[in-house]
Amino acid sequence: MRFSDRITFVTEKEGGYNPITGEHEEAKLEMVTKPCNLSTMGVDRTNELFGQIDKKITVARLQSPYTKPFDYVRIKGQKYNVKRQSDYRKGVFYLEGVSGG
């Protein structure tokens, strides 16, 4: 299996007042990019797992599990929310695209 695609895990850090420095800090995005294998899920399998056939689900398979907390992922500039993560293989994510992201 080729891991020629890239997935970016994005964590949004909130800004606000920092009592240690006495300054207001801006919100930051922390991004971690990993190699992955991307594929789309067929209609039959989407119906079996999620009970919906009108959703386009993208499957991202990583070489090793990614266990750090994150808010959403980006693939080729498009924002995706994680619908589900595989229980037995923590490196498999089922993603649903976000419109306007």
Image (cartoon, helix red, strand yellow):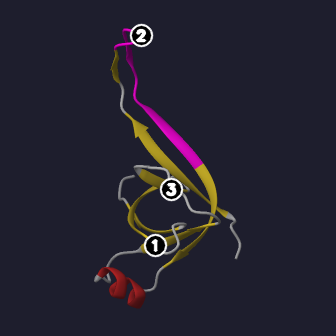
Instruction: Check if residue 26 falls in the magenta segment.
Output: yes
* 100 lies above or below 37: above
Mark 2 and mark 3: Cα distance apart in space: 31 Å
Q: Quadrant of residue 7?
A: bottom right
Image quadrant holding the N terminus, namely: bottom right
Q: Is residue 6 left or right of residue 98?
A: right
Mark 3 and mark 1: Cα distance apart in space: 12 Å
Mark 3 or 1, nearer chain start? 3
| Nearer to the camera, 84 or 27 | 84
- Rendered location of residue 73, percent (x, y): 47, 54
Element marked by disc 2? loop
Q: Quadrant of residue 84?
A: bottom left
| Badge 2 density bin: few <14, some 14–19, many ≥20, Cα 10 Å | few
Q: Residue at x 47, y 71 (%)?
A: 58
Mark 2 and mark 1: Cα distance apart in space: 42 Å
Q: Which residues are magenta?
A: 19-32
Q: Where does label 2 land, which residue?
A: 21
| Nearer to the camera, 65 or 15 | 65
- Rendered location of residue 26, percent (x, y): 40, 23
User: At label 1, which amino acid type do we have?
Assistant: Ser
Mark 2 or 1, nearer chain start? 2
- Rendered location of residue 75, percent (x, y): 53, 58
User: At label 2, which amino acid type do we have?
Assistant: Thr
| Badge 3 density bin: few <14, some 14–19, many ≥20, Cα 10 Å | few
- Rendered location of residue 12, percent (x, y): 41, 39
Q: Where does label 3 land, which residue?
A: 67
Q: Where does label 1 land, which residue?
A: 86
Q: Residue at x 57, y 47 (%)?
A: 32
Q: State yes or no: discs 2 and 3 in contact (Cβ < 8 Å).
A: no
